[in-house]
Amino acid sequence: DTEVTQTPKHLVMGMTNKKSLKCEQHMGHRAMYWYKQKAKKPPELMFVYSYEKLSINESVPSRFSPECPNSSLLNLHLHALQPEDSALYLCASSQFLLYEQYFGPGTRLTVT
Amino acid sequence: SQQGEEDPQALSIQEGENATMNCSYKTSINNLQWYRQNSGRGLVHLILIRSNEREKHSGRLRVTLDTSKKSSSLLITASRAADTASYFCAMATEGAQKLVFGQGTRLTINP
């Protein structure tokens, strides 16, 4: 199984809502990532987990809260988002850091 | 900026022609990777080339790396309509624990 799954595919939320994005992989990868991507731009790294520990936080606002419950799952908890947070959120995994990354299809988030 | 520069930003060619995309970077790298992204979807890994390698092939794809010039190129031969996508290079820089993506090249293959 070489697939990274993400749910939901689409999400519309108000600025006062709390929601979560979920990501799952069953390839035994030890590194997992959250990226944010705006239209016609490259993916922008948000968080990196290595061996289930937060390795990198790219100065992401606290309204985004990552969680890695186990080696297969990665969550991104969202709270009090702003309209400018609307974007495609991509999850990825790799066997180890700096190895080739496998991306999920993304969650299209719209904040109203 | 640590980001790579890619050129051209956009490329439009006829089906069957070859497409070449270039990537330049600023710092020493551990490896350089190329990814493809179809509109609004996840990225797909194409090729990883290590800093001690000069060329790699995968099917119709050929990647070269010149560490003295800090540059890489991706060649797609005999292009097909299905190759229409955005292509990103991503640098694994020495000392960092992350990939840094270039700005991307939008490739359009016209039938």
Image (tube, rainbow, N blue to C red):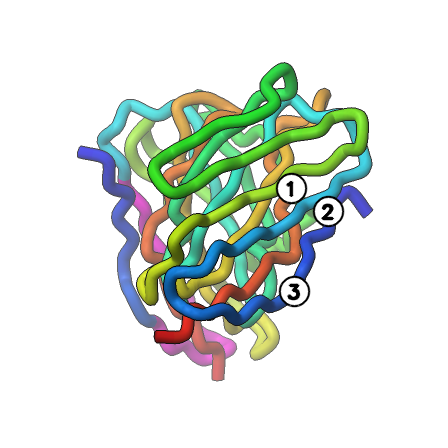
User: Do discs 1 and 3 share a chain?
Assistant: yes
Where is mark 1, residue-wise? B100
Please tell me how crowded label 1 is: few (under 14), some (14-19), or many (20+) other residues with Cα within 10 Å.
Answer: many
Q: Farthest top residue? A: B52
Q: Nearer the viewer, mark 1 or mark 3?
A: 3
Q: Residue flagged by tag 3: what amino acid is it? A: Gln
**Residue A106 as seen in the image, left or right of residue A100:** left
Kindly identify the amino acid type of the residue bearing the numbered disc 2: Gln
**Residue A20, can we see it?**
no
The N terminus of chain A lies in which quarter of the figure? top left
Judging depth in this view, the residue of B56 and A106 nearest the camera is B56
The residues bearing labels 2 and 1 have C-alpha atoms spaced at a distance of 6 Å
User: Is A103 contained in the magenta span?
Assistant: no
Q: Nearer the viewer, residue A80 or B10?
A: B10
Q: Give the residue at x 53% y 61%.
A: A37
Q: Which residue is mark 3?
A: B9
